[in-house]
Image (cartoon, helix red, strand yellow):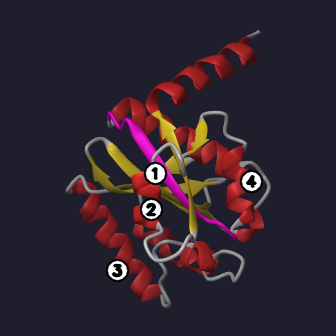
Amino acid sequence: MLKKHDLHECHSLHKLMMDPAVFPYVRYKCQSYEEYLFLTKQLVVAELQGTCISRTILNEMGQPIGTIHLYDIENKTGFLATWIGAPYFGKGYNRRAKELFFTELFLEHQIETVFLKIRKQNIRSKKAVEKLPYAKLANDLNRQLYQSINHSEQIYDLYQVERFNFLESSTVMQHEVAT
């Protein structure tokens, strides 16, 4: 469901990203395929340098349907950016991708906190993150960071996922599935 980037997937990912239902909410906006290809190459290099972790999201048939990134990694924290192509909205891919990615981040990369800044008008993303039992609204929990991402006006809500909360929730979910 998640894999490291493959430049051969850039064409189909760029096409999905350009959809008007997706494009306004993408962190790394690219107007052309060539620009998207260049950006993907930069993300691969940035991951080698330890400043980001980036994956392609795949459907059950192995087709690329979106991307998920942890960027601005510093002191075992970072910011999450995720997008999924419109044909795949509402099918559970977002939640599954986040859970797989959080598992990798917390267990393989020793990340402690993942922040998500979501535009207040992005109702789809807000509803998706609020369904995650381990994600907490952090506007008041982390007031200084909230103010820094909204320095001129309040555009974003801030959410955070702590390693402990995610792993505890994952253990509970696995136990419920097993019984």
Real-space Cα separation, disc 2 to disc 1, in angstroms: 6 Å
Q: Amino acid at mark 2?
A: Gln
Furthest residue to the left? 49
Of the image marks 1 and 4, the number of the one nearer the N terminus: 4
Classify mark 3: residues with Cα within 10 Å, few (<14), some (14-19) or many (20+). Answer: some
Question: Label 3, on which residue?
Answer: 38
Of the image marks 4 and 2, the number of the one nearer the N terminus: 4
Nearer to the camera, 68 or 81: 81
Question: Label 4, on which residue?
Answer: 127
Q: Could you say whether the residue bearing mark 3 is in a helix, strand or loop?
A: helix
Classify mark 1: residues with Cα within 10 Å, few (<14), some (14-19) or many (20+). Answer: few
Q: Amino acid at mark 3?
A: Phe
Q: Residue at x 62, y 60 (%)?
A: 63
Is 55 above or below relative to 41?
above
Q: Could you say whether the residue bearing mark 1 is in a helix, strand or loop?
A: helix
Q: Which labelled disc corresponds to residue 143?
A: 1
Q: Amino acid at mark 4?
A: Lys
Q: How many marks?
A: 4
Of the image marks 3 and 1, the number of the one nearer the N terminus: 3
Nearer the camera: disc 3 or disc 1: 1
Relative to 37, 21 lies left or right: right
Nearer the camera: disc 4 or disc 2: 2
Where are the magenta residues, as a range? 110-121
Q: Could you say whether the residue bearing mark 2 is in a helix, strand or loop?
A: helix
Question: Label 2, on which residue?
Answer: 147
Classify mark 2: residues with Cα within 10 Å, few (<14), some (14-19) or many (20+). Answer: some
Furthest residue to the right? 90
Real-space Cα separation, disc 2 to disc 3, in angstroms: 32 Å
